[in-house]
Amino acid sequence: VQLQASGGGLVQAGASLRLSCAASGRTFSSWRMGWFRQAPGKEREFVAAVWGGAYTSYADSVKGRFTISRDNAKNTVYLQMNSLKPEDTAVYYCAASTGVGTYGTWGQGTLVTVSS
């Protein structure tokens, strides 16, 4: 299993970005997929996850602004980020849980920088 994240960039506060994470593997639709982020000097934190048919969960800090979705035909998970804030600046990682348990596969990360 390999994950390739993309879509990061430099934007101003209030702007939007959509991150994508393309996965290899024939059973993508059964995986729990998540987005995490790590800001400079901080620990990595959970952002959002999607699993099952369309179950989702979000960190409180992004609820109402970020939306996670997946396209199983394309083996891709997305993170639509709206109303971005400077505190959203971080390297964003996608991760996959391909069985029972924690996320075992991680992408390489994509940098999101939000200027004020």
Image (cartoon, rainbow, N blue to C red):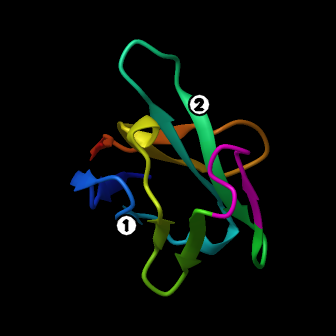
User: Disc 2 designates what residue?
Assistant: 45
Furthest residue to the bottom? Answer: 73
Please state if 45 lies on the left or on the right of 64 as rendered.
left
The local secondary structure at tag 1 comes to: loop
Where does the image place residue 93, in percent across and percent down from the top left?
43, 43
Q: Residues within 10 Å of mark 1 (few under 14, many from 20)?
A: some
Disc 2 residue type (three-letter):
Glu
Marked residue nearer the N-terminal end (2 or 1): 1
Q: Which span is picked out in magenta? A: 56-64
Q: Is residue 27 visible?
A: no
Seen from the viewer's position, the closer of residues 91 and 63 is 63
Front: mark 2 or 1 = 1
> So how many labels did they put on this image?
2
Disc 1 residue type (three-letter):
Ser
Quarter of the image for residue 16 reads bottom left
Distance between the alpha carbons at the discs numbered 2 and 1:
20 Å
The local secondary structure at tag 2 comes to: strand
Quarter of the image for residue 52 reads bottom right
Q: Residue at x 34, y 64 (%)?
A: 15
Q: Any magenta on residue 45?
A: no
Q: Residue at x 77, y 38 (%)?
A: 101
Please state if 64 lies on the left or on the right of 105 as rendered.
right
Seen from the viewer's position, the closer of residues 77 and 115 is 115
Where does the image place residue 113, in percent across and percent down from the top left?
27, 42
User: Disc 1 designates what residue?
Assistant: 16
Q: Residues within 10 Å of mark 2 (few under 14, many from 20)?
A: some
- Magenta segment, principal secondary structure? loop
Where does the image place residue 109, in percent across and percent down from the top left?
33, 41
